[in-house]
Image: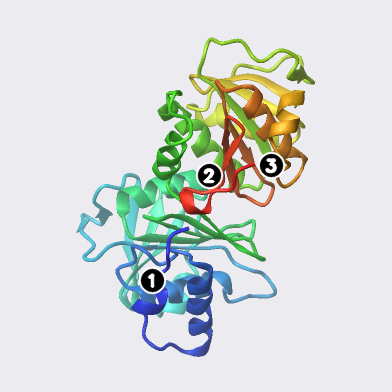
């Protein structure tokens, strides 16, 4: 996990903000990394965690905190398509926030003011869309999702609050570099669509799943797979609609899903059965889903296995080893 620099960057703050800053520091969360104004970002994160209620309703929210100075051209943000900027400098900050739903409209904060409302031509509520927007825009994006999650998108990845605990997912490039240290014989760059799908679609929606990626012509290990669903459409993760269909099916289907080297669905509803050697060599990890997946990765050295927990965290597996973080010093081996 990335070391936090919150405590060293921020001045002494009012009680609520100081408690939040201390919590981020203690958890080692890079939630404010990349913010041009750490105090302003902390204020917006505090609001997203506890927005103003109206008639008992908890509003959604979203704010863009771009790097300073922000460059506007003809009421648009350079480098970002399909967005209109509407000046709201004459509005009080608290009132301006009411127009930002975190899906198609976002507040734009610079320094201690909300200067614009960014209105998009399509729904931007999904985690994957906001990861891409942050990459184009820079700075931070903070969102309170309709499901109740609060998410911070920045150069250090995605930091989530699910109402109980914090969780941090590093950028996908960091995961792939880390995987390369334990799966050097596999063309690991091809796993990118599955990682993106696992972290930002399944993890973001708290859909537990086991994904098996097999970029090889080698046959699957004998008697290690049992098909519970005999037929599945060949859907691809490079298509928005087909990806949504896979996620919908995974949310309602037990067992693992298998993908080929092109990130296309090959099989769904697969029960994993470990060999005697795997049982003896690979210890238990967390629950049944993680243990069976870890032992399958031992039995099938030509695969990469991705397990998504129902509470969001993602674990990469290869050769009976579990990469639970991009930091080698924190890696847990099954």
Circle 2 packing at 10 Å, graded few (<14), some (14-19), many (20+), is: many
Measuring 67% from the left and 15% from the top, which residue is drawn there? 221
Name the residue carrying label 2.
200
Among the two numbered marks 2 and 3 on one chain, the one whose residue lies closer to the N terminus: 2
Percent x, y of residue 35:
34, 66
The part of the image, by quadrant, that contains residue 86 is bottom left
> What is the image's colouring?
rainbow
Q: Left of 157 or right of it: where is 266?
A: right
Q: Which mark is residue 208?
A: 3
Name the residue carrying label 1.
5
Say whether marks 1 and 2 touch (CB < 8 Å): no
In the image as oriented, which residue stretches furthest toward the right? 228
Q: Secondary structure at mark 2?
A: helix
Observer able to see residue 207 = yes
Measuring 65% from the left and 17% from the top, which residue is drawn there? 233
Among the two numbered marks 1 and 3 on one chain, the one whose residue lies closer to the N terminus: 1
Percent x, y of residue 218:
56, 11
Circle 1 packing at 10 Å, graded few (<14), some (14-19), many (20+), is: some
Q: Secondary structure at mark 1?
A: loop
Q: Is residue 177 above or below residue 86?
A: above
Q: Residues under labels 1 and 3: Cα distance?
A: 32 Å
Percent x, y of residue 22:
50, 79
Q: Is residue 10 above or below residue 222?
A: below
Observer able to see residue 272 = no
Q: Left of 103 or right of it: where is 70?
A: left
Percent x, y of residue 254:
77, 32
Say whether marks 1 and 3 touch (CB < 8 Å): no
Q: Residues under labels 1 and 2: Cα distance?
A: 25 Å
Among the two numbered marks 1 and 2 on one chain, the one whose residue lies closer to the N terminus: 1
């Amino acid at each position: 996990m990335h070391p936090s620099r919150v405590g060293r960057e921020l001045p002494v703050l009012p009680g609520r903000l100081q408690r939040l800053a201390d919590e981020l520091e203690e958890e080692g969360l890079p939630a404010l990394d990349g913010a041009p104004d750490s105090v302003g970002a902390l204020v917006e994160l505090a609001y997203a965690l506890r927005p103003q209620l109206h008639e008992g309703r908890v509003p959604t929210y979203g704010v863009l905190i771009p790097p300073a100075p922000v460059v506007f051209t003809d009421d648009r943000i350079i480098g970002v398509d399909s967005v209109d900027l509407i000046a709201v400098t004459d509005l009080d900050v608290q009132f301006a926030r009411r127009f930002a739903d975190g899906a198609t409209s976002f507040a734009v904060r610079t320094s201690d003011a909300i200067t614009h409302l960014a209105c998009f031509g399509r729904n931007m509520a999904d985690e994957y869309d906001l990861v891409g927007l942050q990459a184009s825009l820079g700075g931070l994006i903070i969102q309170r999702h309709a499901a109740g999650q609060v998410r911070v998108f920045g150069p250090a990845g995605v930091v989530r609050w699910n109402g109980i605990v914090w969780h941090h997912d590093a950028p996908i490039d960091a995961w792939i570099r880390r995987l390369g240290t334990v799966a050097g014989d596999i063309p690991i760059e091809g796993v990118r669509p599955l990682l993106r799908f696992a972290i930002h679609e399944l993890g973001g929606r708290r859909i537990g799943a086991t994904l098996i990626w097999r970029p090889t012509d080698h046959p699957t290990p004998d008697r290690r797979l049992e098909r519970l669903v005999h037929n599945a459409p060949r859907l691809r993760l490079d298509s928005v609609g087909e990806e949504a269909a896979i996620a919908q099916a995974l949310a309602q289907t037990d067992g693992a899903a298998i993908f080929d080297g092109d990130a296309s669905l090959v099989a769904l509803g697969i029960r994993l059965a470990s060999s005697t050697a795997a049982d003896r060599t690979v210890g238990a990890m967390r629950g049944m889903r993680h243990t069976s997946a870890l032992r399958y990765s031992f039995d099938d050295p030509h695969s990469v296995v991705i397990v998504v927990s129902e509470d969001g965290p993602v674990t990469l597996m290869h050769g009976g080893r579990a990469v639970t973080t991009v930091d080698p010093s924190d890696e847990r081996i099954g």
